[in-house]
Amino acid sequence: MKRRLSIVCILALTLLVGCGKKDQQPSSDGNSKVSAKNILITYFTFPETDGSDTSSSASRIVLDNKVIGSTEYMAQMIQENTSGELFKIETVQEYPGTHEPLVEQASKEKEESARPVLKQEVKDFADYDTIFIGYPNWWGDMPMPLYSFLETYDFSGKTIIPFNSHGGSGLSNTIDTIKKLEPSATVIENALTLPRNDVNESKDEIIKWLNNLGLKK
């Protein structure tokens, strides 16, 4: 009789522990390596035509006689050194190409909590398990198109790896913002953040970062 009771107790405890693990929410991870089969590298970029150095602006890099944004350069380096697919986050509306008008529009969108309409969608988003998300730091925050993007898709169970460029503000509070927007995803706190003036010489640093994540191919 006692033996039967012990067996029943053990089974009940096993079921309870198993259920507890199943119900746990994904957590942020700053150190462990990422295991990924399907990687998507998304980014928002907007190179200014007048190349300003003001910290609230988007930046630009001239690469092979082509002007690209700093986050686009970072995304390309990530794509070259992983097995990921690239996706550029674009909006239906056009942004001013010069610094001052762009800064003003970015500020206005932030004040209004705007959600710019996205131009295209990611095909087969559900098939990806690890999502890189790149953005410049605009006014100590992500550009508002990033909010549109994060609110468009279901990131449940996925791993989000942020990366950004900045003019002195680093990541600001964007990691916490992403975690709030996507509570059912695992957000890697070991994000890559680079001063925009250093981005064009950052290849080795990007590769080192990917190695630390266990994603360098």
Image (cartoon, grey):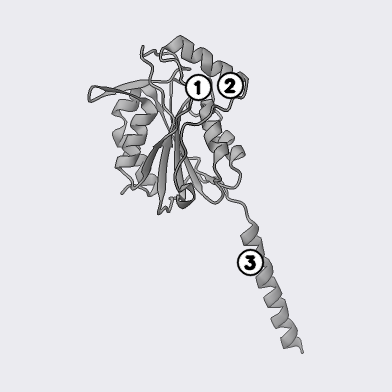
Which badge, 2 or 1, is on the more N-terminal residue? Answer: 2
Residue of label 2: 110
Q: From this viewpoint, which residue is outermost toward the left?
A: 64
Residue 45: which quarter of the image? top left
From this view, report whether residue 97 is shown above or below residue 184: above
Which badge, 3 or 2, is on the more N-terminal residue? Answer: 3
How far is the residue under mark 3 from the one under mark 2? 44 Å
Kind of element beneath mark 3: helix
Please, what is the three-letter code of the amino acid marked with disc 2?
Lys
Q: Are marks 2 and 1 in contact (CB under 8 Å)?
A: yes
Residue 107, x across and y down, in percent = 55, 16
Residue 137, x across and y down, in percent = 48, 24
How far is the residue under mark 2 from the one under mark 1? 9 Å
Residue of label 3: 18
Write the residue at 58% across / 16% down: 108
**Nearest the camera: 12 or 129?**
129
In the rendering, which numbered label is found on residue 93? none
Left or right for 131, reference 50: right
Tell which tag, 3 or 2, sits nearer the viewer: 2
How far is the residue under mark 3 from the one under mark 1? 44 Å
* Quadrant into which the N terminus falls: bottom right
Write the residue at 40% across / 47% down: 39
Residue of label 1: 138
From this view, report whether residue 181 is shown above or below residue 29: above
Please, what is the three-letter code of the amino acid marked with disc 1?
Trp
